[in-house]
């Protein structure tokens, strides 16, 4: 994709980029009070506020609508901050452009729908306004990349990805599980793409936002989007995950930034040696997997001869529980082992299913 570096369209940008503002625009007074407070924080360059709020159920606060755009325009004029809001359809885009909104963002509920993203992309043709794209609610990297590609094909080259975590059926410590491997893989595939973390939606808890902000810096993200409100407990939406401007200032001041390289030669030498060890272990892991799948094929052959199905749920549960317990005894996370062995077992079933298809084709030829 053709993506313009973020420092080419946000002048004098220092890392990290901080985007701050309330979850929802409530009143013009609330907007201006928040904006004037966060403007005093050096790293804050963009003010955010939701005007249209997609909610799970009806009869809940769904945003103030179009009048909030005028408030954002006032914020821009009185503070000098860039302003951004969420758009979910072509109508939102048209109104945002008419009110000189600087940057748009596409929410997780919209990213999940390619038809909605395409509608927005079509409405943006010929504008090249910067667009930030949140990850879809489900852990689907291809869907996230697809949304970015649709916008890029429409001529938008000022793109930013926002990592806001992923929904999970399981109860976890997070509101939305971060699954850090997904944004890391996005960065590997699209190294030129800026990625910003949204710790407010990941945690759902203002007291844990600082930890997630630091983690975002540790994995080389370009900035954070933190929901900020003068009186968070009185917020009309997502009160628990919003911080005060004072808290935001403390969080940004506490961030420890890392660089990709060090000028210390002894560090580079030791790092190289450790990476070589990892490379050797990875080679051994691949060899172990090859040996494992060889045995899987022998099991598949045995199953075919005895007319047994490839997928056996009880065996899968037994194996994963055993491996999870083994991992925990070794000091590894049980959830990690669970996820890893689901992938390995899925590949095993695919191998045996393919063997079965090949076997049946051979039988048909003989008959």
Image: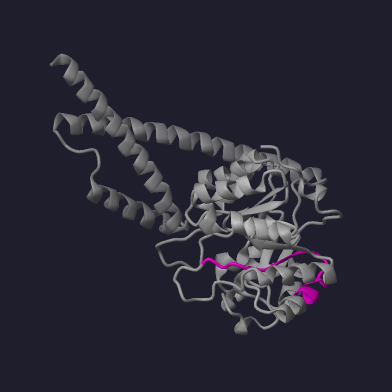
User: From which residue to which does the magenta span run?
Assistant: 35-54
Left or right of 318 on screen, residue 267: right
Residue that appears at 46% across and 66% down: 172
Name, please, the residue furthest toward the right: 12
Q: Quadrant of residue 42?
A: bottom right
Q: Who is closer to the viewer here, 204 or 59? A: 59
222 vs 257, nearest the viewer = 222
The quadrant of the rendering that contains the N terminus is: top right
Q: Dividing the picture into quarters, in which one does residue 212 lie?
A: bottom right
Left or right, residue 57 beside residue 302: right
Q: Position of residue 57 (x, y in %)?
A: 44, 71
Task: Please report the residue visible at 36 percent of the width from the left and 51 percent of the height from the top.
Answer: 323
Residue at point 61%, 84% (across, down): 234
Residue at the limit of the structure toward the top, as seen here = 366
Q: Is residue 220 at least partly visible in the picture?
A: no
Q: Position of residue 355 (x, y in %)?
A: 27, 28
Position of 20 relative to 329 (above/below): below
């Amino acid at each position: 994709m053709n993506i313009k570096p973020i420092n080419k369209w946000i002048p004098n940008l220092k890392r990290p980029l901080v985007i701050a503002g309330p979850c929802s625009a409530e009143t013009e007074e609330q907007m201006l009070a928040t904006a004037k407070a966060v403007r005093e924080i050096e790293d804050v360059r963009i003010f955010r506020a939701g005007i249209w709020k997609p909610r799970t159920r009806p009869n809940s606060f769904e945003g103030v609508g179009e009048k909030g755009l005028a408030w954002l325009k006032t914020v821009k004029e009185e503070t000098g901050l860039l302003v951004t809001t969420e758009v979910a359809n072509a109508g939102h885009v048209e109104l945002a452009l008419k009110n000189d909104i600087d940057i748009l963002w596409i929410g997780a509920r919209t990213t999940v729908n390619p038809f909605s993203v395409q509608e927005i992309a079509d409405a943006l043709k010929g504008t090249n306004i910067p667009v930030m794209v949140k990850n879809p609610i489900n852990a689907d990297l291809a869907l996230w990349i697809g949304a970015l590609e649709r916008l890029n094909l429409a001529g938008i080259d000022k793109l930013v990805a926002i990592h806001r975590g992923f929904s999970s059926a399981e109860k976890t410590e997070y509101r939305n599980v971060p699954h850090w491997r997904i944004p890391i893989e996005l960065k590997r595939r699209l190294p030129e793409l800026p990625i910003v973390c949204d710790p407010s939606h990941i945690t759902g808890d203002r007291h844990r936002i600082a930890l997630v902000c630091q983690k975002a810096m540790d994995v080389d993200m370009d900035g954070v989007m933190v929901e900020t409100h003068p009186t968070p407990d009185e917020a009309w939406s997502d009160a628990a995950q919003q911080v005060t401007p004072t808290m935001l200032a403390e969080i940004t001041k506490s961030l420890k930034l890392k660089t990709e390289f060090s000028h210390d030669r002894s560090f580079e030498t030791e790092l190289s040696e450790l990476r070589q060890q990892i490379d050797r272990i990875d080679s051994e892991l691949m060899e172990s997997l090859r040996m494992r799948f060889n045995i899987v094929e022998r099991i598949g052959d045995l199953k075919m001869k005895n007319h047994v199905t490839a997928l056996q749920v009880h065996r899968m549960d037994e194996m994963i529980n055993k491996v999870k317990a083994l991992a925990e005894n070794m000091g590894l996370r049980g959830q990690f082992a669970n996820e890893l062995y689901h992938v390995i077992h899925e590949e095993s079933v695919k191998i045996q299913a393919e063997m079965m298809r090949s076997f049946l084709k051979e039988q048909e030829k003989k008959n």
